[in-house]
Each structure stands twice: as C-alpha cells, then as structure tokens.
Amino acid sequence: MDAVFELWNEYILKEWEGGIADRPLRDDPGGLTNKGVTIAVWKEWAPKLFGITGNETTLRQLTEAQAKRVAYEIYWKHYGIDKVTNPAIKLLLADSVWGGGGYSSLGYKSGTYAQRAAQINKDNQANPNLFNVLVNRRLAYLRSLKNYEVNKNGWENRVWKGDPQRLSLTQVVAKYKLNNAAVGISLVSAVALALVARAVYKRMKNKKK
C-alpha cells in the first residue's frame, strides 16, 4: 500500500469515521455503516474480499483490518486513485469517493475512472494550484446537498477546519507538504516514521487512561 493511502487511513478514516451508525436515511443515505463502510458496499464486497456473507451482522463485526482493506481495494484501487500523481489530490479524491460525489464533485463528470485520473494529472501540470481549486469545488458540492445542514459541522471540519482532536484533510496536506510533492523514498520514509511515532504516542496515551 502506498504512503499516501496510509496517511488517509490513519488521519482521516480512523479519526473521522466512527463505529456503528444507523441514522435516518434523510440524514445519511448510506444507511447502516461501520467504520465508514456502508451496508450496500459491504453486501457487495464482503463475499469477494473475505469470503463471508455481507449482511448487518457481519458488518457490525467489521474489524479495523477489514475496513482498511475495503478502503484500499474498493476505493483507492477500483476508482483509480492510485493513478493520480499529486499526493494532496489523491487524499481529496479518495475522501470524495468515500464520502459520496466522487470525481463528479470535483468537476470530473465523464470518462472512465482512469481517464478522469489522467485528466486530473494533466490539469495539475497546467495549474499547480489545482488542489485548492478542487477543495473549493468539493465544499461547494457538499454545501449544495439537502442534508448539508445536519452534517455541515462534520463535513466542514473533515475537509478543512479540523477540530481540537483531529486534523482536517487540508491540514494533513499542509503538515506533510503533500501538494505536488514527489512520491519517492523521502516521502515514504517521512510518512513511515511519522506513523510509527503516532502509534507509539497512542499506546502511551492509552496506558495513562
């Protein structure tokens, strides 16, 4: 798995996706969800990835390792996010596909996923500020949804505001200087060291409780 995926999983999915949620469909069209994995996705992919029946019972038993594999196999790879070259845009696109709206919410509404990823790469070469443009498009999309009012704090915090306990997506990008960063040994090493340090910190924090 690539370093940028690990950042998305560690800082966004683990932090912003809660446990089991089953809110009214008017507020959350995904229905029953666990660790961000919806019942519809689980029904389709649990048999393919894990050889088990995808139903409410098995979704409620979803492990962190299973949730991570779903995120990687279905979202990161299936939607062609691994084909995008700008690490910052990878994060934004992954979260847009995960949260709903996908490529279309960023302005890329036609073509295969591979074609849209290629167009993003082309646009990024022409405009080094593309990431910020796409963040604004994503926010405009979220603010246009009928259920925005009941979800606005979580959505806005997750994309750009953050909160006292968690970094937003744009804050992760800034922290690791991801916008148009070259994905090479230096970035991979920096991310690996940061995640190890983060894991150690979490263990120490949990011991103090």
Image (spheres, grey):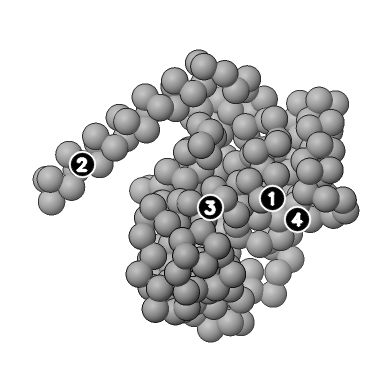
Give the camera-side residue of 7 and 208: 7
Secondary structure found at label 2: helix
Q: Is residue 165 left or right of residue 187?
A: left
The Cα–Cα distance between marks 4 and 2, rounded to whole angstroms, is 37 Å
Secondary structure found at label 1: loop
**Which x, y percent locates residue 73?**
57, 50
Residue mark closest to the camera, 1 vs 4: 1
For badge 4, the amino acid type reads Ser
The Cα–Cα distance between marks 1 and 3, rounded to whole angstroms, is 11 Å
Residue at image mark 2: 203
Residue pictured at 45% horizontal, 69% vertical: 52
- Extreme top residue here? 186
Residue pictured at 65% horizontal, 55% vertical: 97
For badge 1, the amino acid type reads Tyr
For badge 3, the amino acid type reads Ala
Give the camera-side residue of 141 and 56: 56
Precedes in sequence: disc 1 or disc 4: 1
Which label number is shown at residue 105? Answer: 4
Alpha-carbon neighbours of circle 2 within 10 Å: few (<14), some, or many (≥20)?
few
- Among the 4 quarters of the image, the one containing residue 182: top right
**Which x, y percent locates residue 208?**
11, 45
Is residue 77 visible in the rendered image? The answer is yes
Residue at image mark 3: 71
Residue pictured at 52% horizontal, 17% vertical: 185
- Extreme front residue here? 51
Q: 182 above or below 29? A: above
Precedes in sequence: disc 1 or disc 3: 3
**Which x, y percent locates residue 22?**
46, 79
Residue at image mark 1: 79
Precedes in sequence: disc 4 or disc 3: 3
